[in-house]
Amino acid sequence: MRFERVSDARFSVDAGRTVNDVPLPKRATSGSAGYDFFAPFDFTLRTGESIRIPTGIRAKMEPGWVLLLFPRSGLGFRYRLQLDNTVGVVDSDYYGSDNEGHIFIKLTLDAREPKELTVKRGEAFAQGVFVPYGLTDDDSADAVRNGGFGSTSH
């Protein structure tokens, strides 16, 4: 498994920026399960607001592995920062999609009282955990992915 940046051309289309110099995700400590994802630009969220972040990152995985995405624990705890799909699931075949497997993360600040969260460019805001998964004995999936967010129509 490894993280890579999407091309500058892809990042320009998705993020409106011409150069993809986003740091690759990395673990903060040797005991960390999660790889921190870093903000490609400054953003501020207020209670009830959402934002879709083009991370500039893609993940190459062997079959039988998945990358699960979560908000950074401290941000979830202090701000009720949540992913709009609760847990992001990046399948191994997403890497080869037409969009280069560009990982997007959509966040909502779901605080119960007025709050504001500002994340500066280069700060960690989400984390990804690689996990192996199993298949049933009678599995027969043969569809081919070409995109994300429900691209297989199932």
Image (tube, rainbow, N blue to C red):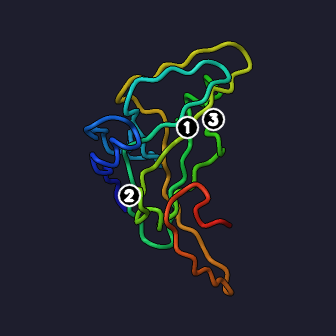
The structure residue drawn at horizontal position 61% and vertical position 39%, both measured from the top left corner, is: 83
Looking at the image, is mark 1 or mark 2 earlier in the sequence? 1
Marks 3/1 in contact by CB < 8 Å: the verdict is yes
In the rendered image, the residue lying farthest to the top is 114
Q: Is residue 148 above or below residue 34?
A: below
Residue 23 vs residue 76: left or right?
A: left
- In the image, taking residue 139 as reference, residue 28 lies left or right, namely left
The crowd level at tag 2 (other Cα within 10 Å; few <14, some 14-19, many 20+) is some
Q: x, y (%) of residue 135? A: 62, 77
Q: Amino acid at mark 3?
A: Gln
Identify the residue under disc 1. 71
Going from N to C along the chain, the mark reached first, 2 or 3, is 3
Spot occupied by residue 21 in the image (x, y as percentages of width and height) = 26, 38
Mark 1 secondary-structure assignment:
strand
Distance in Å between CA atoms under marks 3 and 1: 6 Å
Percent across and percent down for residue 81 are 61, 30
* Residue at the (53%, 66%) spot, across then down: 132
Residue designated by label 3: 82
Q: Tag 1: residue type?
A: Pro
Q: Which mark is residue 100?
A: 2
Disc 2 residue type (three-letter): Glu
Quarter residue 153 falls in = bottom right
